Image (cartoon, grey):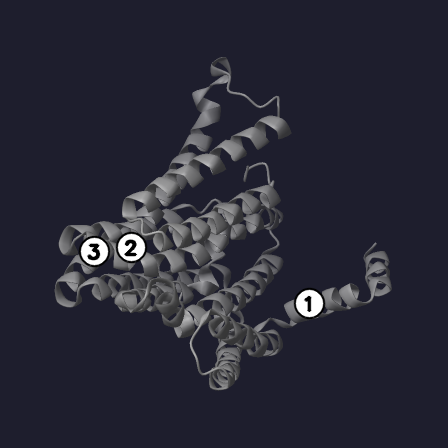
Amino acid sequence: MGAAEDYHVLNGLYIFAALARLAYSVVLLKLGYGLLALLCAQFAVIGIVWLLDHLYMKWRYPQLSFRPRWFGWKEAKPLAKFSGAVFLGHVAGLLNNDTDKVIAGIMLGPAAVAIYQVGYKLYDLARTLFANSVSVIMPTAAALSAKGDQDKLNQMLCQVSSVMVGIMAAVYFPLILYGGEFINLWVGPKFADSAKVLIWLSFAILLGAHVRVFGSILWGLGDWKANVYPSIIAAFFNVIFSVLFCLKWGIIGIAAATTLVAFGGYTWWTFYAMRKFGVKPWDFFGRAWIGSLLGMAVGASLSELIALTFPYMDFWRWLYRCVAFEVGFWPFMLLFGLTPQTRTQFGYALLGLILPKFSVARRQENL
């Protein structure tokens, strides 16, 4: 479906899967079911998504089918090479994301897996929303590279990176600041270590927010080695450090090891992007992080006012605090975190939403 560029359907399926995971996690844990029930529900959701994907492709492209007599190694070799790289990339991603729970189960027992899974689930629900949505820029990156338009490619990298920093900061900063409160309301104080796991994992993904789209651009350029090899190396070191940190600090050490390895990988990709594309650190990630940190400071201050207004802890208090954070965060992110081109485009889009005639006039000017 990604190759057919039906990204709206693909992203819809992944959003459905993320919301379904959230729903069955809350319901099953509230009803007292354990890890086995969560795994069975996860397999059921995966099967439903695969079936919907298959049915859509059959409906959208009825002529699409596999013909063995069409197969020729000369034509299939480049496709097989690229597909093999994609497969290895997915394996490395699974090893980076899922070996932690295996290590926790082997070294600390099933109870530790449940504690880790609660924090990981909240982190992963947000992560899956971004996991495939950034792939929409892959065809654009390939087209710009084929034209040799390096300036527009660099501009796109900086623009999309700044937007991703803002979006991911708006999601993961509240999880870092208020995730513990939500976990306490959800499953009780006995899962206090789950909040620490959530904080470490949220830091792990936030550190690489600016390179979140870089992988899709590399796929679009055909530079799969820069995607796959570092991911495999990171998966290897993640296992080693997770085991060592687990021996010293238990389940929190596993999450801390993931953050440490992620920081190393993201640092390498950052320097590789700056060397390959010649982008400046300020344009690539500096401006976006300054805007997000300013927004976080203001949003957290507004959230504390809500906490003083509603002293009793409940779900609504937590929700109001998150809303207050977003209200304070986004103005500063938009003003100071986005590139000038993105800010201008956002302003035109906002004016077009408020004044439909302005939007029509803009489209006529572009024609």
Q: Look at discs 3 and 1 and give the one toward the viewer.
A: 3
Disc 3 and disc 1: Cα gap in Å?
A: 47 Å
Query: In the rendered image, which residue does mark 3 sit on?
Result: 111
Question: Considering only order in the chain, which callout, 2 or 3, is on the residue closer to the N terminus?
Answer: 3
Question: Considering only order in the chain, which callout, 2 or 1, is on the residue closer to the N terminus?
Answer: 2
Left-right relation of 240 to 200: left
Residue 355 image-quadrant placement: bottom right
Residue 164 x/y as whole percent: 52, 63
Q: Look at discs 1 and 2 and give the one toward the viewer.
A: 1
Crowdedness near tag 3: few (<14), some (14–19) or many (≥20) residues, C-alpha within 10 Å = few
Residue 234: image tag: 2
Quadrant of the image containing the N terminus: top right
Residue 346: image tag: 1
Residue 64 x/y as whole percent: 58, 23
Q: Look at the image and tell me whether residue 19 can be seen.
A: yes
Residue 84 image-quadrant placement: top left
Q: Amino acid at mark 1?
A: Phe
Residue under the image location 51 percent in, 69 percent down: 170
Crowdedness near tag 1: few (<14), some (14–19) or many (≥20) residues, C-alpha within 10 Å = some
Kind of element beneath mark 2? helix
**For the residues bearing labels 1 and 2, Cβ distance under 8 angstroms:** no
Q: Amino acid at mark 3?
A: Ala
Crowdedness near tag 2: few (<14), some (14–19) or many (≥20) residues, C-alpha within 10 Å = many
Q: Is residue 306 above or below residue 25?
A: below
